[in-house]
Amino acid sequence: MKSTIVSVAAAAVLATTGSAAAIELVFAHGYPTTHPLSVTYDRFIPSVEESSDITLTVHPGGSLLTLLETSPGLRDGVVDIGTVLTPYYLAEFPDSNLVANLSMLVTAGRPHHAPGAVMAGATMEYIFFNCEDCQADYASQNQVYLGSLSTAGFDLLCRQPIRSVEDVSGKRLRSAAANFGRWAEHFGGIQVSVPANELYEALSQGIVDCAMNSISELTGYQLHEIVSYATIGFLGGVFSGVDPHNVNRNTWQKLTEQQRSALLDASAKGVAAATANYYAVSAENIAKAPDMGVEVIQATDAMIEANNAFVEQDLAVIEKQFTEDYGVENAGEKIALARSLIERWREMLADWDGTEESLVEIYRREIFSRIDVSSYAVD
């Protein structure tokens, strides 16, 4: 791939008519090509270039910006498009992080066979159409939101076995978001914040005992080389705070409507592809875990009941935290709305067949077809 950095100012040249000429945009992300998420780029990049006059210069795997550097780099115009993990920036994106913190609702009570697909759909419907404050957060960071993807359900990938609630006590657990950190502490564990691309090293050096991650990461980050146990059905939730294709706001507003439409349609393909791939890889890894030297431990009824109780009581904690610490207004009403959307998507995807093709059509129909490119994020 090309590695030349093209500035936003140089790339976006306006004709006298006010419509953009052919344009080259810089796209940076922090994920390795072996990661289940990387399929989002395999769909997004060719779709954009085949359906528009946009050319993408891509810097993958943190070669230009790491996962922690991408949001400020996107804000400042270092790149035009980037993958932003909003839970890494709680203060900057409080409202979208509020809904991301509710992901355990997808798996608590009535487990769903595809919690990631449910949460991605609910998150996108919430942010695009039901959360003006979310949109204001993105605008304040000079970004335009183009959709979210989600991991599969979260599990405990550990160096020592977790066979009971009591086994969590004293363990150092890598937390990907605030709700998972509270879960760890609730059950006597110690939450440790480690960026995803440093997880392998943290486990290998004993900095953490368990990764709170999807079992897809046994192969995504090659964690099967380090962990020996995977406890599934206890933790639950998903990591849905992944915006794979956010766009610099100045860049977005210089694009033609056709170019914006191309980016949005490519994003629909990308978020569906990655979310479906997480679903497939997780199922494969559960089946293949013994061959990789990883014992799969099914949660007991007592563990499931303890988790369900935590999720319900944590809703009040989420409301208080996001109100007092991050200034989210009407947090209780927003939680209720997000919860209703999660339930709507639970029903909509009850019979989802697990294929990428069907998921992209659902996301297009229910979300992306409703976005007006002539007015979205242009004021």
Image: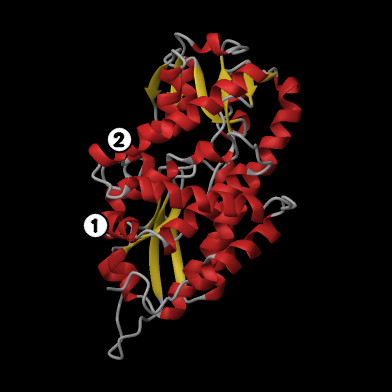
How many tags in the picture?
2
Q: Which residue: 44% across, 43% down?
A: 100
For disc 2, the neighbor class at 10 Å (few under 14, some 14 to 19, many from 20) is some
- Disc 1 element: helix
- Locate residue 175 relative to residue 357 in the image: left or right: left
Question: At which x and y percent is residue 334?
Answer: 38, 50
Residue type at mark 2 is: Gln
When the figure is inspected, residue 301 is found, relative to residue 103, above or below; the finding is above
Which label belongs to residue 358? Answer: none
Residue 260 percent coordinates (x, y): 43, 73
Q: From the viewer's perspective, is residue 325 above or below residue 328?
A: above
Q: Residue at x 64, y 37 (%)?
A: 110
**Type of amino acid at the residue the image marks with label 1:** Ser
Q: Where does label 2 land, which residue?
A: 321
197 or 338: which is nearer to us?
338
User: Looking at the image, is 298 positioned above or below residue 326?
Assistant: above
Q: Are marks 1 and 2 in contact (CB under 8 Å)?
A: no
Foreground residue among 302 and 185: 302
Q: Mark 1 packing: few (<14 Cα in 10 Å), some, or many (20+)?
A: some
Residue 140's disc number = 1
Position above or below: 161 against 305: above
Q: Is residue 15 visible?
A: yes
Identify which residue is drawn at 70% across, 50% down: 350
Instruction: Depth check: give the residue in front, 374 or 346.
Output: 346
